[in-house]
Image (cartoon, rainbow, N blue to C red):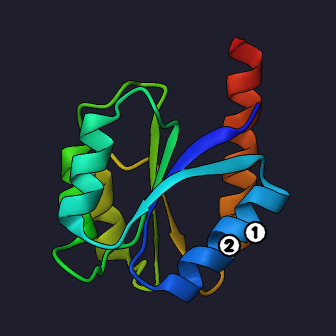
Amino acid sequence: MRLKTYIVEDNPTIRENLIGTLEELACVIAVGTAETENDGKTWLNTNPQDWDLAIVDLFLKQGSGLGVLAACQDRSSSQKVVVLSNYATEDIRQRCAQLGVDAVFDKSNEIDALIDYCLEQMSRLDAKS
């Protein structure tokens, strides 16, 4: 079993490297990606049973990751939403918490923590099944 993960990231290099790393190290399967706020919101809301984890960047080609986060507030309690951003300041972390985000990770120095988080979520899914 793998953690079904949807990734909202507009940089193709970062997105592909992230998918490769998480699929190899964290029992993740990427079920889709988006580069814009609208595409991310649309997919997540029209496929509510098809994802366990959403990883969202804040700065996108169109719109903002904050809009994607706001659209995820009514998700199932088992679904997790995390932010992966170069701008993981204290203010951003507080704003994300207000939007119901489960965790915030800095792209530059918290990738290992994101991997650990994914593994923790996977073990919780395994325990439920």
Q: Is residue 16 above or below residue 115?
A: below
Which residue matches tag 1? Answer: 21
Quarter of the image with the N terminus in it: top right
Pick whichever of labels 2 and 1 is earlier in the sequence.
Answer: 1
Per the image, label 2 sits on a secondary structure element best described as helix
List x then y, in percent, for residue 31.
54, 48
Q: Which residue appears at 73% of the width and 41% of the height? A: 120
Q: CA distance from mark 2 to mark 1?
A: 9 Å
Q: In screen coordinates, is 3 left or right of 81?
A: right
Q: Position of residue 28 (x, y in %)?
A: 70, 49
In this rendering, is residue 14 above or below 100?
Answer: below
What residue sits 61% from the left and 76% below the top? 16
Tell me, yes or no, whether the two marked residues, 2 and 1, touch with CB atoms within 8 Å: yes
Q: Is residue 42 left or right of residue 111?
A: left
Quick check: 30 left or right of 124? left
Can you tell which quarter of the image residue 35 is in?
A: bottom left
Q: Which class describes the residues within 10 Å of circle 1: few (<14), some (14-19), or many (20+)?
A: some
Mark 1: secondary structure: helix
As drawn, which residue projects farthest toward the top? Answer: 129
Which residue sits at x=37%, y=50%? 101
Q: Tell me which amino acid carries mark 1.
A: Thr
Q: Which mark is residue 37?
A: none
| Residue drawn 83% across the image and 60% down it | 24
- Front one among 129 and 84: 129
Give x and y (percent) for residue 39: 25, 60
Residue identifier under label 2 = 111
Residue 110 appears in the rendering: no
Identify the amino acid type marked 2.
Ile
Q: Position of residue 6 (x, y in %)?
A: 48, 52
